[in-house]
Image (spheres, helix red, strand yellow):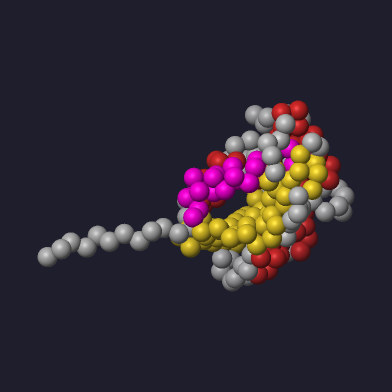
Amino acid sequence: MESTVQQAINLRYSELAQTSCCLSCGGAINHSKAVAGETCVDLGSGRGTDVLRLAESVGPTGFVYGIDISDGMLDKARHHAAQLGVGNVAFLKANLEALPIEDGKVDLVISNCTINHADDKQKVWNEIFRILGNGGRFVISDIYSMTQVPEEYRNDPEAVAECWAGSVTRDEYVDQLGKAGFTDVQILEESEPYAKGKVEVVSWTILGTKRFKKTCSCKNN
């Protein structure tokens, strides 16, 4: 069952699916550098615009999954893909904490201003690490808060749905990345702080790679 916050997000974005407004806080796809044959995932895929761009980049030998919880957005995305005759895509309804994708299957994960919505952000990062293959990468645009977001906003479904009240601090964000297993993370873009409610937040785009340490099973003679 969806939480109150998730219900508010679903409702807000289903309504926005019928508009032409910009929905993201960054341009993760502009740094993604998808290539032919790759398998990609867009978390919070909305109307499917970035999924369709990725589908063109990866070509017929690649595949792109769009993940969203908004029925309105998913319907719009599927309609766009069908209109354009794009067959190497699938739009799936799922929470970010439980992605319906096999372990190690993915080369690239992108997302624009979506992870801050999640109830359990650590699980989201764990899932991203799980579905990426060795050497796979993520390019994520998101928001962090300069200080802890007050409970009055954190418990307000509308404020969370507006992409800022669910944010964590920069230190918490970095800690979650490390706990998930990402040790190779770069900041590609980072805004100046700007006011939201009683706090200031920052938009950033980060790049991370999944790398397993090589182990030696050699035996001494």
Q: Which residue does the image show at 49% across and 55% down from the upper left?
A: 183
Q: Quadrant of residue 196?
A: top right
Number of numbered discs:
0
- Out of 92 and 21, give the one closest to the viewer: 21
Q: Residue at x 79, y 51 (%)?
A: 23
Q: Is residue 178 covered in magenta?
A: yes
Q: Quadrant of the N terminus?
A: top right
Q: Is residue 107 left or right of residue 26?
A: left
Span shown in magenta: 162-183
Q: Nearer the viewer, residue 192 or 212?
A: 192
How far across and how far down the image is residue 57, in percent? 65, 69
Question: Position of 43 compared to 213: left or right?
Answer: right
Q: Position of residue 80 (x, y in %)?
A: 77, 57
The reply to whether residue 190 is in sight is yes
Q: Residue 17 magenta-drawn? A: no
Whether residue 77 is visible: no
- Quadrant of image for the C terminus: bottom left
User: Residue 167, position in %: x, y?
Assistant: 68, 41
Closer to us: 56 or 189: 189
Q: In the image, residue 33 lies at what x, y percent?
A: 63, 69
Direction left: furthest residue: 221
Horizontal side of residue 93 vs 213, given as left or right:
right
Q: Nearer the viewer, residue 40 or 110?
A: 110
Q: In the image, what residue occupies the spot 31% across and 59% down?
A: 215
